């Protein structure tokens, strides 16, 4: 069994490359393990002498590091007892998984402008198909018993070709059709995660993953991020040290809009392979490349790492179709298909057949339409923020439908409360943060709605919530 000192030895080399005093770098390494969840609240720490011996450091260095951690509230110590990780560590003040997910849902009474959900209105191709499905399906709208619990064959083949076009050497027996990408994530996580090892996540990530992790009996483990995206060197070190069952990555990151460079992705996959970690590549937003460059799927990079690819039609076409998919090896896919069928017998066969035709015949033109609409709405958001004189800050997203907005000196939670009362709900940063306390001055601002709706939303927020 790996000791706390062993875990620290596994990641300390990353912080030794820094420029600060060695005691500070040691303290930062311990903080990183606490923030990521590798060390839980109340974990017993080694004595100063034992840790100094294990890490080949002077005892004075360890003493100074421990004192720094006590001053910052990271360590608690009682006379004659070993120090323990204190109340600033992971898990003490985190939102529940249900709390996180509920914040991104629209209630039964629609608000004035719903900015708490990053789900789009239907694309024109969807509206046309649903207005007269028999025309699209050539008179075959209603067939059989209406079920396609294991996935409509035409949709499976359409998804297979769709993934091949993006570089994944997919086969039909490797595809699982799901009721949206959310169900695909749930299936993958609850099947592959275990109580004995954590699930690694970008430190800021999609809230829909947390409930699946809790259902698997596992716990989230934060991979460090900067404003530019994932800290790949730090993340690779932590993967090798913690050896999580799964690493969940989003393309583009939800909500920050960042993406991994291909070389960084290869390095991270190598770390995952060496630690026996399966990577879930969530490409639900991966086609929404605002810059015009769609990142290659991780499964197409040929690294030998185990990769499960998740995708769906919700962010390009419409979430109401409830069509997602999962790509993995044929053995696991067969297991997940039957497990998925036992949950709800699948999304309606009619919608699956419509989805197959839309994916084959309308994907490129619909994606182009959706990207044009997103860019137009984003421009309207920028203009509305400037006109309102708001001091909000946001790094330009590379892709995806959201801004990750910072409000200097303000509490995002209190702002979100005022925004909801104003009829323009937003989601505060805590819902996306693996580490409690992170994102306290941030909120997600989706720009899927029309420019007119976005201007109204920003104007209302400026007048009644800011």
Image (spheres, rainbow, N blue to C red):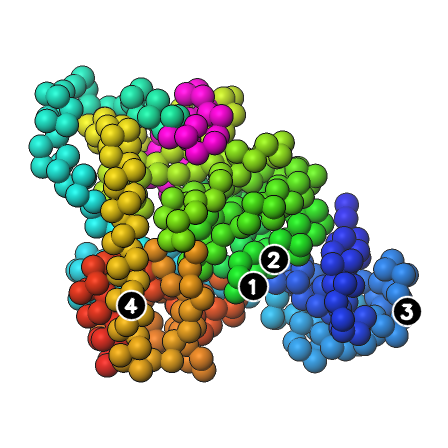
Q: Which residue is mark 3?
A: 58
User: For the residues marked 2 and 1, what is the alpha-carbon distance in whole angstroms?
Assistant: 6 Å
Q: Up-down: is 141 above or below 382?
A: above
At horizontal 53% and vertical 34% (from top left) the residue drawn is 299
User: For the residues marked 4 and 3, what is the alpha-carbon distance in whole angstroms?
Assistant: 54 Å
For label 4, count other residues whose C-alpha is less than 10 Å away and answer few (under 14), some (14-19) or many (20+): many
User: For the residues marked 4 and 2, what is the alpha-carbon distance in whole angstroms?
Assistant: 29 Å
User: In the picture provided, is 293 more to the left or to the right than 21?
Assistant: left
Report the front residue among 339 and 276.
276
Q: Up-down: is 236 above or below 366?
A: below
In the image, the segment drawn in magenta is: 162-184
Under tag 3, what secondary structure?
loop
User: Magenta span has 176?
Assistant: yes
- Tell me where residue 102 sits by quadrant: bottom left
Residue 452: x and y in percent read 18, 65
Instruction: Point out which mark residue 231 bears.
Output: 2
- Camera-near label (4 vs 2) is 4
Q: Which residue is mark 4?
A: 381
Under tag 4, what secondary structure?
helix
For label 2, count other residues whose C-alpha is less than 10 Å away and answer few (under 14), some (14-19) or many (20+): some
User: In the picture provided, is 342 more to the left or to the right than 318?
Assistant: right
């Amino acid at each position: 069994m790996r000791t706390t000192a062993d875990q620290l030895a596994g990641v300390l080399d990353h912080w030794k490359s820094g420029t600060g005093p060695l005691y500070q770098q040691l303290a930062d390494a311990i903080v990183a393990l606490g923030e990521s969840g590798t060390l839980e609240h109340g974990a017993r720490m080694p004595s100063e002498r034992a840790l100094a011996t294990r890490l080949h450091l002077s005892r004075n260095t360890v003493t100074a590091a421990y004192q720094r951690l006590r001053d910052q509230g990271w360590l608690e110590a009682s006379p004659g007892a070993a120090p323990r990780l204190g109340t600033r560590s992971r898990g003490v003040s985190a939102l529940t998984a249900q709390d996180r997910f509920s914040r991104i849902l629209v209630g039964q009474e629609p608000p004035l402008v719903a900015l708490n959900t990053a789900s789009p209105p239907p694309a024109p191709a969807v509206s046309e198909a649903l207005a007269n499905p028999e025309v699209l399906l050539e008179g075959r709208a209603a067939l059989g018993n209406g079920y396609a619990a294991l996935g409509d064959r035409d949709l499976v083949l359409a998804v297979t070709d769709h993934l091949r076009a993006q570089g994944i050497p997919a086969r039909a027996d490797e595809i699982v059709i799901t009721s949206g990408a959310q169900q695909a994530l749930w299936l993958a996580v609850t099947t592959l995660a275990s109580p004995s090892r954590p699930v690694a996540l970008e430190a800021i990530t999609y809230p829909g993953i947390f409930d699946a992790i809790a259902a698997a009996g596992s716990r989230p483990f934060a991979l460090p991020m900067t404003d530019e995206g994932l800290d790949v060197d730090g993340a690779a070190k932590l993967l090798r040290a913690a050896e999580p069952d799964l690493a969940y990555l989003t393309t583009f990151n939800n909500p920050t809009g960042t993406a991994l460079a291909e070389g960084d992705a290869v390095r991270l996959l190598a770390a995952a392979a060496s630690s026996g970690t399966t990577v879930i590549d969530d490409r639900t937003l991966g086609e929404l490349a605002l810059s015009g460059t769609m990142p290659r799927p991780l499964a197409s990079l040929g690294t030998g790492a185990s990769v499960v690819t998740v995708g769906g039609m919700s962010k390009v076409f419409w979430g109401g179709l409830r069509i997602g998919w999962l790509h993995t090896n044929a053995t696991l896919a067969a297991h997940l298909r039957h497990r998925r069928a036992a949950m709800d017998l699948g999304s309606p066969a009619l919608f699956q057949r419509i989805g197959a035709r839309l994916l084959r015949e309308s994907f490129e033109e619909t994606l182009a339409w959706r990207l044009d609409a997103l860019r137009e709405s984003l421009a309207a958001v920028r203009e509305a923020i400037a006109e309102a004189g708001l001091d909000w800050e946001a790094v330009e997203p590379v892709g995806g439908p959201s801004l990750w907005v910072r409000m200097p000196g303000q509490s995002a939670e209190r702002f979100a409360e005022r925004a909801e009362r104003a009829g323009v709900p937003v989601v505060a940063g805590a819902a996306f943060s693996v580490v409690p306390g992170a994102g306290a001055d941030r909120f997600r601002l989706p720009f899927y709605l029309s420019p007119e709706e976005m201007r109204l939303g920003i104007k209302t927020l400026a007048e009644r919530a800011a």
